[in-house]
Image (cartoon, rainbow, N blue to C red):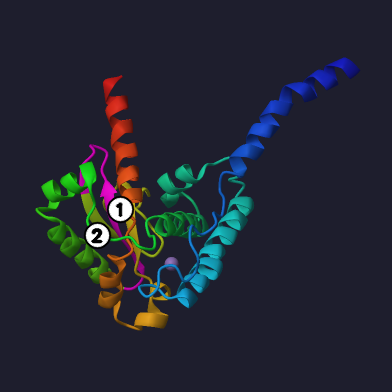
Amino acid sequence: MKTVSILAIAAFLPLAVFAQKKEASITFDSLPYAFNALEPYIDAKTMEIHYTRHHRGYFDNLLKAINENSLGDKPLSELLAKAGTFPPAIRNNAGGHYNHTLFWKVMAPNAGGVPQGVLGERIVATFGSFDKFKEEFTKAAMSRFGSGWAWLCVADNGTLFITSTPNQDNPLMDVAEKRGTPILGLDVWEHAYYLNYQNKRASYIDAFWNIVNWPEVSSRYLALTETKKQSGKK
Ligand code: MN
């Protein structure tokens, strides 16, 4: 009997390690630059509060909600894709965590300008020109009533589209009007701009173009379209 129980433990050991690894995959990444790095476009105080309190709050509450609903075996991608089937605490905080993690990475100091390479070409082909793209994205960000996000996304067929979502929803969710994978996101909650811009969302959106990390957005676009090409070949 002793031998059997030892064997049983040994058999389950790799599974336990695997489960731990999976849970650890929802991480609170460090900010890729200093709080003041995006000044004067986003001020240091806003960045600090936004990252350490708002984003941290979504992250902590996500872990709590995962625990309370025994969803520890689900990857973040599944929590998002089936958001509509889970309690609101999962939908709101999984979205809040994913959205902010992306947001910090698609901004950078000394950035902005015009996207180069394939993404730059696809933006011009899709929207007419880079300025037209900016206009359409700005419109999506401006017309989102209350809190939410504006997105540049890649659809399942590889095409680009602009959309916006309310609250902490995003286009990866089953509840989204238009579904796709976001490669650029802009937080238009007042907490993202109120200290510096007060009610002037348009000025904040204008400033955003100076800190868009196009190389990062491009590499996300290429990774997605390469994956689609490869899976299409099979
Ligand atoms: Mn936010």
Marks 1 & 2, CB-CB < 8 Å contact: yes
Q: Position of residue 218 (x, y in %)?
A: 30, 46
In the image, residue 159 lies in the stretch drawn in magenta: yes
Q: Is residue 106 above or below residue 121?
A: below
User: Which region of the structure is painted magenta?
Assistant: 146-160
* Residue type for callout 2: Gly
Q: Position of residue 126 (x, y in %)?
A: 13, 48
Q: Secondary structure at mark 2?
A: loop
Q: Quadrant of residue 156?
A: top left
Q: 49 or 35: nearer the eye?
A: 35
Q: Residue furthest front?
A: 110
Q: Secondary structure at mark 1?
A: helix
Q: 167 or 182: nearer the eye?
A: 182
Q: Position of residue 38 (x, y in %)?
A: 40, 68
Q: Residue at x 49, y 54 (%)?
A: 94
* Residue type for callout 1: Trp
Q: Residue furthest left?
A: 128
The residue labelled by disc 1 is 214
Q: Quadrant of residue 132?
A: bottom left
Quick one: label 1 or label 2, which is nearer the N terminus? 2
Q: 132 or 43: nearer the eye?
A: 43
The residue labelled by disc 2 is 113
Q: Residue at x 28, y 70 (%)?
A: 205
Q: Is residue 195 above or below residue 212?
A: below
Label 1 environment density (alpha carbons within 10 Å; few <14, some 14–19, many ≥20): many
Label 2 environment density (alpha carbons within 10 Å; few <14, some 14–19, many ≥20): few
On the question of residue 126 being in view, the answer is yes
Q: Is residue 214 left or right of residue 129?
A: right
In the image, residue 210 lies in the stretch drawn in magenta: no
